[in-house]
Image: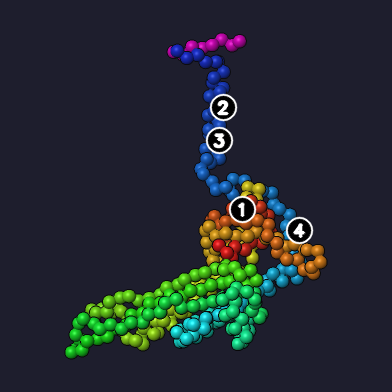
Amino acid sequence: MKPRLKIGNATTWRSCGFVRATACGMIALMFACGCGTTKPWERSQSKPWDFTPYKPPREAEKRISDEKMRVAILVPEADHRNHPETAKAMEAEMTSRISSLNKIFQIAERSNQHMVEAERWIQSNKGGISGADYLITASVNSLNINSYLSSVVVNGQIPTYWNVSMGFDFRFYELETGDLIMAKTVRRGEHKYFDPLSKYKGLASQGVAVSRVAEAVVESIREFADELAVRAAPPARVLETRAKGGYAKISMGKDHGAKKNMLVDILELVQYEGEDKPRLSQVSTGRITDVNAMDSWIKTNKAKRGHYVKITIKQ
């Protein structure tokens, strides 16, 4: 046994110098390596995954890029009766906007039979619509154009001014299941007092008010269609993984409409027996945790390099 050294009331071993030196060395190493907080995917990188099994043949890759959602568009007959001009504008603008997203959607050919089928489906959620797997509806839930007399006389006359307020409802249905996949209500309006003696603040004429409705239709449909396009866009890819597949970097970012906390589906190509071509099958789900311009990080329980990733259409 080694002799002890007394320091005040404490006793220690001669080897305490070695212990202190070792502890100091460990602390120095921690600072040298950096002890700041890191994000989970920065702590450990999984081994690069063999990309070959999930690299699809060209015809399968082309098939995925060519797959489109076949949609029908309906503005209910009631809107055509109560708001004829607005209903026509909505129908035309929605058709134009969805048509411009031709890499994602294919619009079913319009006909009287098509309209009858769509109206029937809305009432019963049964049956189908020729040439369509999905249905987009756009309707006016409020539209008010009101005139008011100013409380101030200007040049011997009492001016009339107009205010307008409106709301639009948009729905996206899957016909086979009857599920409402996406719903959005957009409101637009002007509720400002018009004072002819001060800076112009209101809608001073009926013509301006009516034109504001047309502008609101365009703005509202663009807002709905752009959000729908993000959810229905072709799949991105898993670029790399961290923490044994618990975190993954995907080729979709802010520029593609991705947002923090959006849900995603992780998919892989599977060749099923009896089918000519492989198709995407869900492997797991995840949630976007960090978003950059061209890519994002997701938290998931199973992801590999090369997997496909789609925004979950029903958030």
Where on the picture, by quarter, is residue 253? bottom right
- Residue 191's x, y, as percent? 32, 75
- Find the magenta span and give its range: 1-8
Residue at image mark 4: 53
- As measured in the structure, the alpha-carbon distance from the residue carrying label 2 to the one carrying label 4 is 49 Å
Q: Amino acid at mark 2?
A: Thr
Dots 2, 4 in contact, CB < 8 A: no
Spatial separation of the CA atoms under disc 4 and disc 1: 21 Å
Q: Which residue is mark 1?
A: 300
> Which mark, residue 178?
none
For the point 68% across and 60% down, the residue is 282
Q: Which residue is painted at 65% across and 56% down in the image?
A: 284
For image coordinates 45% across by 12% down, the residue present is 9
Q: Is residue 258 above or below residue 85?
A: above
Asked if the residue at tag 3 contacts the one at tag 4, i.e. Cβ–Cβ closer than 8 Å, the answer is no
**Residue 206: x, y in percent?**
34, 86
The residue that label 2 is drawn on is: 22
Q: Label 3, on which residue?
A: 29
